[in-house]
Image (cartoon, grey):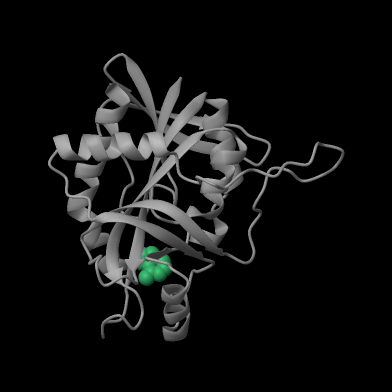
Amino acid sequence: MKKAIIGGTGVYGMGGETRIETVTTPYGPVEVDLVTLGNEEVVFLARHGKKHSLPPHLINYRANMKALEKLGVKWIYATAAVGSCNEDFAPGDLVVINDFLDFTKNRPVTFFEGGGEPVGHVDMTTPYCPMLRDRFMAAARVENITVKGEGVYVCTEGPRFESHQEIRMFRMLGGDVVGMTNIPEAIFAKELGMCYATVGMISNWCTGMQQDQIALHDIETALGNNKEKLTRAFLRVFDQ
Ligand code: HPA
């Protein structure tokens, strides 16, 4: 059984002994890193591409997830750079995602596309794998990584950031953090029967939470320290 890490903004590789492989899928080719970890190979996929050249709304989520399936992946940890719309979560904090609100508008959101195939409706009672979430928390304790809490991920279409009123609305609806990529990734993992968990890396306050404007450059800087810590905890889980 294979395990994978999907790196979001700021997380473009894992270091270590790595082979690059291109996986063909019905949705197009996907380049992944196969990273040696003890006797195992862990798959690493840079969601936005290694050079951050793919904006959130143009990522080929279906190809990415089909490629992981084809490689035999069953467990996935994803990182996600997110803004915080919850006063308790500040830039630099890590938050384990426990549910989502889907505000995407224009992306393929399912593998079930009719055409004579059976209709599928996946259950979303636990969109994020409780087992992987628990194991991450345990590994984070061992690695001395502070996890600030759990939170609801609001997924917007992007690539623009949100307006003041959108953030007010998301807060009213119970959103804690805002990003642009976790949907449809989390949905596809469910449809493919994979265990999937996401750790949000808070890179900024959402629009209107503070005075500052948001810039991608600041986001990448804010994630700098956390990414090594996070991958260490993921690998600790995988290595058990
Ligand atoms: N909004 C949406 N996506 C994001 C943000 C944000 O504030 N920060 C990082 N990704």
User: Which residue corresponds to the image point at 62% horizontal and 39% vertical from the top-left?
Assistant: 191
Q: Does residue 54 show up?
A: no
User: Which residue corresponds to the image point at 24% horizontal and 47% vertical from the top-left?
Assistant: 227
Q: Is residue 141 left or right of residue 29?
A: left
Q: Is residue 40 left or right of residue 174?
A: left
User: Which residue corresponds to the image point at 44% horizontal and 48% vertical from the top-left?
Assistant: 47
Q: Is residue 223 above or below residue 231?
A: below
User: Which residue corresponds to the image point at 53% horizontal and 55% vertical from the top-left?
Assistant: 183
Extreme residue in the top direction: 39
Q: Position of residue 20 (x, y in %)?
A: 41, 30
Q: Is residue 40 above or below residue 176?
A: above
Q: Is residue 112 left or right of residue 19?
A: right
Using the image as rendered, state which of residue 7 and residue 146 is in the foreground.
146
Locate ligand 1 by image quadrant.
bottom left
Q: Position of residue 195 (x, y in %)?
A: 47, 34
Where does the C terminus fall, quadrant-wise?
top left
Extreme residue in the right direction: 116
Quarter of the view holding residue 13: top left
